[in-house]
């Protein structure tokens, strides 16, 4: 009785979200069916592609969970050439993906800022201004965000990783470059600069509780985000968090909790874009399709040149290391149809929430 009433609501307390996240068995089935219905009703059955180009694994930061952190000397560092990046973007455009995501380690040198700026202009040029561009290059100054926006980026992904600042402090070094306040401030800068703003968290981190995750969902609503990308935390041997792996839930439990986070967010913020992120597939081969079923509506086919993929290992068992862009597209197409969705080829598929908050009518 309590669950039926709860599932009819469109706003939830931290306790109620915690309750939803803890559901198992028939209760969870009803919860996931409700989120699937809300997704269908509000954003429809379409799935939008964002071709992901992981263009460099060089990073100045040392996040304790991440395989490409600065101090991991076992990583072979790379920086894809402009031609390689533009080639991947051309593939996206020619195959009507409509959007790309440029992702990298975090650097803030003038040379890096200038390079991204130049790439943005070239991507716009090669696609007759048609390709939508999302950036995911970490924390930058307000000026840099503005400059990149003016050069053509219109969405930005910057995960808060953990919205409980005590948990944030446990998974980052205690240096000024890894400050929680700075990350939140960066999200505000992005919003002021005009971007569609995406954030997210890792699910199943050591020391993380269900209350923390419920708090993350409320943080997303408070920040009034337009897009979200959440995925299970997966350990990596050469990171400082690895010795805490005995504290982790099983991978299957982390996976199911990630699906419940997606479902709960779809109920809490029905009109935002939610990504079915890659780490879901690292645990369950059909992980991304399952995420689409419970509430996600964006997928990021990997377009990173194959020769670099093994060096962008954020966590163990990262999938699709050998699949080239063409194979990846064919495989995804089949999987998405199996999940009962259709691909919005040639459509940007921008966040409806963004248009609503800006007072535009969504076309
Ligand atoms: N450097 C930029 C940043 O940190 O915002 C963008 C690239 S970073 C590799 C992209 C995301 O990878 C991070 O936001 C983090 O959530 C995720 N990530 C890193 N290590 C991970 C792990 N061990 N398991 C799951 N996700 C991880
Ligand atoms: Fe660098 Fe991003 Fe990894 Fe942190 S999560 S170490 S900023 S690549």
Image: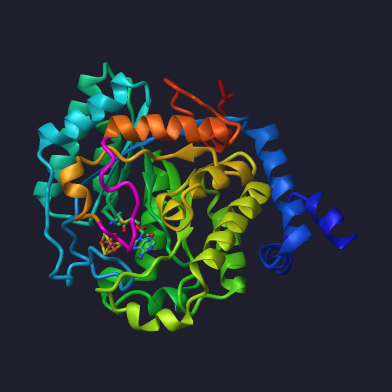
Q: Which residues are magenta?
A: 313-324
| Apparent side of residue 96 relative to residue 30 in the rendered image (left or right) | left
Name the residue at 20% across, 42% down: 306
State which image quarter holds ligand 2: bottom left
Residue 290 falls within the magenta-colored stretch: no
Quadrant of the image containing the N terminus: bottom right
User: Looking at the picture, how far across and down is residue 167, in whole percent?
Assistant: 46, 76
Q: Is residue 61 visible?
A: yes
| Apparent side of residue 183 relative to residue 77 in the rendered image (left or right) | right
Quadrant of the image containing the C terminus: top right
Q: Is residue 153 visible?
A: no
Residue placed farthest to the top in the image? Answer: 128
| Apparent side of residue 21 relative to residue 206 in the rendered image (left or right) | right
As drawn, 165 above or below 257: below
User: Looking at the picture, how far across and down is residue 126, in whole percent?
Assistant: 20, 20
Residue 317 falls within the magenta-colored stretch: yes
Out of 172 and 144, give the one closest to the viewer.
Answer: 172
Residue 4, located in which quarter of the rendered image?
A: bottom right
As drawn, 351 above or below 220: above
Out of 143 and 296, give the one closest to the viewer.
Answer: 296
Prevailing secondary structure class for the magenta stretch in the rendered image:
loop
| Apparent side of residue 40 relative to residue 305 in the rendered image (left or right) | right
Marker count (numbered): 0
Name the residue at 69% across, 50% down: 32
Name the residue at 17% across, 48% down: 308
Name the residue at 71% across, 62% down: 20
Q: What scheme was used to colour the molecule?
A: rainbow
């Amino acid at each position: 009785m309590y669950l039926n009433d709860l599932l009819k609501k469109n706003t939830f307390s931290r306790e109620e979200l915690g309750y939803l996240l803890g559901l198992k068995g028939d209760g969870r089935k009803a919860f996931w069916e409700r989120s699937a219905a809300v997704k269908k009703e509000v954003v429809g059955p379409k799935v939008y592609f964002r071709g992901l180009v992981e263009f460099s694994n060089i990073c100045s930061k040392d996040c304790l969970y991440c395989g490409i952190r600065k101090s991991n000397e076992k990583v072979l560092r790379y920086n894809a050439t402009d031609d390689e990046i533009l080639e991947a973007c051309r593939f996206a455009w020619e195959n009507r993906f409509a959007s790309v995501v440029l992702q990298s380690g975090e650097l803030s040198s003038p040379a890096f800022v200038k390079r991204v700026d130049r790439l943005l202009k070239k991507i716009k040029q090669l696609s007759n201004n048609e390709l939508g561009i999302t950036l995911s290059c970490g924390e930058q100054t307000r000026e840099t965000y503005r400059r990149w926006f003016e050069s053509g980026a219109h969405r930005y992904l910057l995960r808060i990783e953990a919205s409980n600042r005590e948990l944030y402090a446990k998974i980052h070094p205690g240096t000024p470059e890894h400050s929680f306040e700075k990350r939140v401030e960066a999200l505000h800068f992005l919003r002021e600069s005009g971007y569609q703003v995406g954030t997210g968290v890792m699910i199943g981190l050591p020391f993380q509780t269900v209350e923390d995750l419920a708090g993350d969902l409320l943080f997303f609503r408070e920040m009034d985000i337009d897009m979200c990308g959440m995925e299970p935390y997966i350990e990596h041997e050469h990171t400082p968090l690895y010795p805490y792996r005995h504290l982790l839930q099983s991978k299957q439990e982390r996976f199911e909790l990630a699906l419940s986070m997606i479902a709960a967010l779809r109920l809490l913020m029905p009109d935002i874009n939610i990504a079915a992120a890659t780490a879901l597939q690292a645990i369950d081969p059909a992980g991304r399709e399952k995420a689409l079923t419970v509430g996600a509506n964006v997928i990021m086919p990997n377009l990173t040149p194959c020769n670099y993929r093994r060096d962008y290992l954020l966590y163990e068992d990262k999938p699709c290391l050998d699949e080239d862009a063409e194979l990846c597209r064919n495989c995804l197409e089949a999987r998405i149809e199996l999940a009962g969705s259709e691909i919005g080829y040639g459509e940007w598929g921008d966040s409806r929430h963004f248009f609503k908050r800006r007072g535009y009518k969504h076309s």
